[in-house]
Amino acid sequence: MEIHVIADPQELGALAASHVVAAIERNSQAVIGLATGSTPLPLYRAWAASVAESKLDVSQVRGFALDEYAGISPEHPESYRSVITNEVVIPVGLTPEFVRVPPSSATDADAAEYDNAIKAAGGIDLQILGIGRNGHLGFNEPGTAFDSRTHRISLTPETIEDNARFFDSVEEVPTEAITQGLGTILDSRIALVIATGESKAAAVAAAITGEVTTDMPASILQRHPNVIWCLDTAAASQLPAELIGA
Ligand code: GLP
């Protein structure tokens, strides 16, 4: 496990993006797991800038989004399909047909097919992850089984509240989602987790140093062989000093 603590959000994004770029330099057909939420946005901007500057060929890169709201129209500006298209596919220059988002129809068949598509692509080389205040990864809320595969899930009131900022009102936030499972995430070869802000500090500390328990989904990362944590100072503030070289 690597833990990087960097105060400046742009620098943090650049460091995180350097890991994504390195994965593509190792394999031009790298399979990248893509996260939504506001935290990875500086990474996506830095990745796009790096591609533009270095002329890195990303045309063969495969992408699999972590999750999608159930029942939302893919054309809705806050669907994760729209967010991934607008924040990642277009600015970075990925090939749209190679970037998948779980379908919002979110049936069991959709979920199984999505998991199989990841396996058929050779598995995820590098999974970008944010973390919820309650420790969720993707939309795997507390209580989700560690061996879960892609599945439909009900969102907790806390997550609905947190995501209301993207919608006109809390009533508009979908109450269910389809998400890669914790087992799917654990299968990734590299997990690149980004967390910023004081509101994530408790979840980050619990995930890294606490008990491995389904009450804290991100604690499953203690069982992942290759995790890179990219934290700002506030998100790292509840970690023991010896872990962050402070
Ligand atoms: C959503 C996403 C997660 C993300 C989390 C945190 O619930 N499904 O993948 O990690 O929000 O979002 P933010 O980065 O905006 O705090």
Image (tube, rainbow, N blue to C red):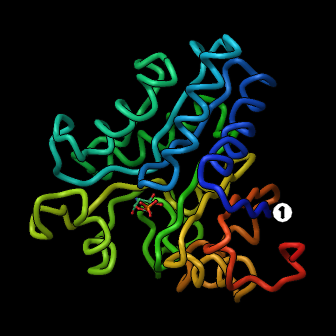
Left of 147 or right of it: where is 190? right
Q: Is residue 145 above or below residue 213?
A: above
Q: Identify the residue position indicated by label 1 in the image.
A: 1
211 vs 129: above or below: below
Q: Which residue is painted at 49% across and 78% down in the image?
A: 199
**Residue at 19% from the left image edge and 61% from the top image edge:** 174
Instruction: Point out residue 228 in the picture as x, y percentages from the top left corner.
Output: 76, 56
Q: Position of residue 112 (x, y in %)?
A: 42, 46
* Residue in the foreground of this view, choosing between 130 and 191: 130
* Image quarter (top left, top right, bottom left or bottom right) of the C terminus: bottom right
Occupied quadrant, residue 76: top left
Label 1 residue SS? loop
Judging depth in this view, the residue of 156 and 17 nearest the camera is 17
Query: In the rendered view, does 182 fall on the left or right side of 4?
Result: left
**45, above or below 161, in the image:** above
How many numbered circles are shown? 1
Foreground pick, 114 / 236: 236
